[in-house]
Amino acid sequence: MTERTWLITGVSSGFGRRLTEQLLDRGDRVVGTVRKPDAVADLRTAHPHRFHAELLDVRDTTALRAAVDRTVEDFGRIDVAVSNAGYGLFGAAEELADQQIDDMIATNLTASIQLIRAVIPHMRTAGGGRIIQLSSYGGQVAFPGNSLYHATKWGIEGFAEAVAQEVAPFGIGVTIVEPGGARTEFRYKGAQIADPLPAYDDNPAHAFHRMLDPANGLAPGDPARMAAAIIDSVDTTPAPLRLVLGSQALTSTLETLRHRIAGFEAQTDLAAATDYPAGQ
């Protein structure tokens, strides 16, 4: 098994933590970014020579680029970069505060874009590498009460899909990971909720309250199995553009895409009618 150097953002909990634990157990090196170093003190103690924590707010682009450069200086290369840091924000669009909107876009979208931009030159120079972008089946499917989260995930998926085509000639693969509901801190502890407006009390935008309450049933996805699938994908060549994790995610995505395609196909005549006539 080839020893790899991984750079992963947001390793204190969720998929970042599961990925890091499994990678260290199998002998890889991990540079993980955190906002609170105490959250990974156990990893530093257990793996002093193969785990390095970078104290980083991913919204700070200058610091993010410096962390990427340090990783290459210290370990020679970045074999796999995982853009994982992010969080959920629930509430109807008009319930969201301006600062909540700015912070979510900065964390979930802009930081992911800047991480990918920062690692590409190093991987290009090294002759290859793999970029893994954590998205969600919410990057394909939309639910009320999740508008800003969807905006960031749909946005990063478009960016990553275009970049995948740009960097393929350099031997760099890009994979967008789309997990379904999983039993992580992201779902039950890490999400933010906007201040509610009474007008939405009986609105579908507040259905997320049921989803976030473990008493209504736990999410079906196993974070450990999902993390293992992400790691295994790195050995697949060419890199899968999308990795859908969880039967719930796949079923919902397929239903949504079929409905979307049917809607497009129903507009065939209308689309053609807006072209110049043939020969003009």
Image (cartoon, rainbow, N blue to C red):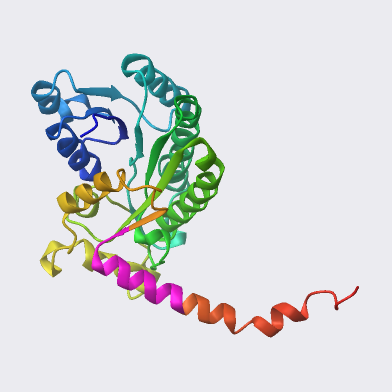
Q: Is residue 185 left or right of residue 153?
A: left
Taking the spot 41% from the left edge, 63% from the top edge, the residue there is 92
Q: Which residue lies at the image location 30% right of the left edge and 66% below the top edge? A: 249
The boundaries of the magenta stretch are 244-258
On screen, 198 above or below 86? below
Q: Is residue 37 above or below residue 269?
A: above
- For the N terminus, the quadrant is top left
Q: Is residue 125 visible?
A: yes
**On the rendered image, what quadrant is the C terminus found in?**
bottom right
Is residue 233 within the magenta segment?
Answer: no
- Residue 39: x percent and y percent? 17, 30
Q: Position of residue 209 (x, y in %)?
A: 25, 65
Is 248 one of the magenta-colored residues?
Answer: yes
- The one of 53 and 168 positioned closer to us in this rendering: 168
Residue 75, above or below 241: above
Among the 4 quarters of the image, the one containing residue 150: bottom left
Residue placed at 47% from the left, 37% from the top?
171
Give the dominant element type of the magenta stretch: helix, strand or loop: helix
Q: Is 111 drawn above or below residue 257 in the view shown?
A: above
Determine the residue positioned at 37% across, 17% down: 70
Q: Position of residue 155 (x, y in %)?
A: 50, 52
